[in-house]
Image (spheres, rainbow, N blue to C red):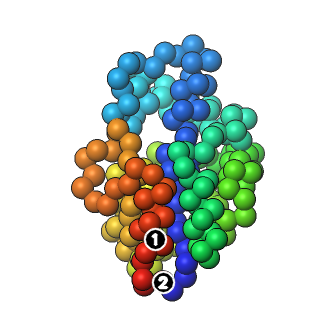
């Protein structure tokens, strides 16, 4: 079996929410206190869905995308897994803009090195990932690391082994959940099927 781990990017490898909050503040938007439990930026900022999507698109097409910091302990443990022979495929809903995609790719490679065998950041963040996962990974049983409950459920439906990265906005998930990449490392390094 291939030693392949499929990963989302934002909220899994990179701390997109942190970078977006800084960017929104620089553009005059104030984050509402105690809104970490919401996935939707419209709830976090008290703006319409239309305005939220517009600001996300602006951010995702900005130069900031090339400088988003790593999430928690992701660099250390992604590197350790790669040293055990694991390769990573990134499936991310960033933007159709080719320059934003290149910045995302450069950011990932700068932070993590040569651990990625495939990076696709062109998915539309408003449409979900299920059909894409179905077309590419149906029945594969690879590990699928996500922060979105909907995308994790999509992964399970197509035969992936979903693990959810813990955040205040995804507490309803009753599947496998981790708080760090160290926990992911322990799960995968101790999996005797590989």
Q: Name the residue under label 2.
A: 194
Disc count in the image? 2
Image coords of residue 95 (percent x, y): 61, 46
When the figure is inspected, residue 124 is found, relative to residue 194, above or below; the finding is above
Q: What element carries label 2?
A: loop
Label whose residue precedes the other's in the sequence (2 or 1): 1
Comparing 140 with 136, the one in front is 140
When the figure is inspected, residue 132 is found, relative to residue 181, above or below; the finding is below
Mark 1 and mark 2 in contact (Cβ < 8 Å)? Answer: yes
Mark linked to residue 31: none
Query: Crowding at label 2, few (<14), some or many (≥20) Cα neighbours within 10 Å?
Result: few
Query: Crowding at label 1, few (<14), some or many (≥20) Cα neighbours within 10 Å?
Result: some
Residue 88 visible in the snapshot:
no
Q: Name the residue under label 1.
A: 188
Residue at x 53%, y 26% (from the top left corner) = 21
Residue at x 48%, y 83% (from the top left corner) = 194
Residue at x 52%, y 60% (from the top left corner) = 7
């Amino acid at each position: 079996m291939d030693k392949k781990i499929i990963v989302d990017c934002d909220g899994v490898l990179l701390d997109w929410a942190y970078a977006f909050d800084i960017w929104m503040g620089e553009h005059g938007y104030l984050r509402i206190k105690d809104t970490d439990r919401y996935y939707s930026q419209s709830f976090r900022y008290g703006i319409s869905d239309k305005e939220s999507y517009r600001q996300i698109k602006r951010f995702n097409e900005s130069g900031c995308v090339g400088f988003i910091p790593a999430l928690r302990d992701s660099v250390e443990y992604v590197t350790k897994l790669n040293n055990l022979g694991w390769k990573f495929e990134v499936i991310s809903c960033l933007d159709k803009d080719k320059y934003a995609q290149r910045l995302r790719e450069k950011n990932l490679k700068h932070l993590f090195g040569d651990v990625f065998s495939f990076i696709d950041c062109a998915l539309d963040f408003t449409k979900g990932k299920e059909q894409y996962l179905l077309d590419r990974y149906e029945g594969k049983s690879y590990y699928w690391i996500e922060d979105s409950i909907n995308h994790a459920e999509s992964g399970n439906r197509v035969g992936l082994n979903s693990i959810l990265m813990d955040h205040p906005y995804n507490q309803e998930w009753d599947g496998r959940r981790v708080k760090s990449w160290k926990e992911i490392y322990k799960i995968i390094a101790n999996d005797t099927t590989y």
